[in-house]
Amino acid sequence: MKINVGTVDRVLRIVAGLVLIALAATGTVGWWGWLGAVPLATGLFRFCPAYTLLGINTCPMNK
């Protein structure tokens, strides 16, 4: 897996993922809030499979 998620993108993904999971855990949103695990994982691993398919790379070191 080649890193394709940059720093700003990574921070936004992690924050969004944690917010969605917290909202789902508190019952504020429905089951779909648990989908926050996807952006959280892609932020933590710095790899997004969708970016690979679309040819996107937000990591400045790998351009």
Image (cartoon, grey):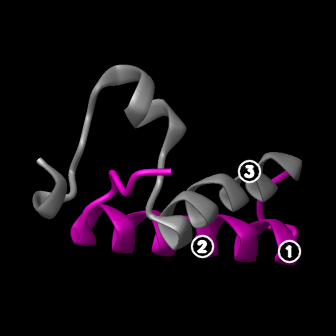
Q: Earlier in the sequence, mark 2 or mark 3?
A: 2
Q: Earlier in the sequence, mark 2 or mark 1?
A: 2
Identity of the amino acid at label 2? Val
- Residue at image mark 3: 35
Disc 2/disc 1 C-alpha distance (Å): 10 Å
The amino acid at mark 3 is: Leu
Query: Is residue 20 highlighted in magenta?
Result: yes
Q: Residue at x 66, y 53 (%)?
A: 38
Q: Quadrant of residue 62?
A: bottom left
Q: Give the secondary structure at mark 1.
A: helix
Tag 2–tag 3 contact (CB < 8 Å) = no
Q: Which residue carries the number 1 mark?
A: 25
Q: CA distance from mark 2 to mark 3?
A: 11 Å
The disc at residue 36 is none
Give left or right: position of 51 versus 22.
Answer: left
Of the two numbered discs 1 and 3 on the same chain, state the one appearing first in sequence. Answer: 1
- Of the pair 18 and 10, the residue shown nearer to us: 10
- What residue is shown with label 2? 19
Q: Residues within 10 Å of mark 2 (few under 14, many from 20)?
A: some
- Residue with the most extreme front position: 1
Disc 2 + disc 1, Cβ < 8 Å: no
**What amino acid is labelled 1 in the image?**
Ala
Q: Is residue 11 left or right of residue 46?
A: left
Residue 8 drawn above or below residue 5: below
Label 1 – label 3 distance at C-alpha = 12 Å
- Region rendered in magenta: 1-30
Residue at point 21%, 51% (across, down): 58
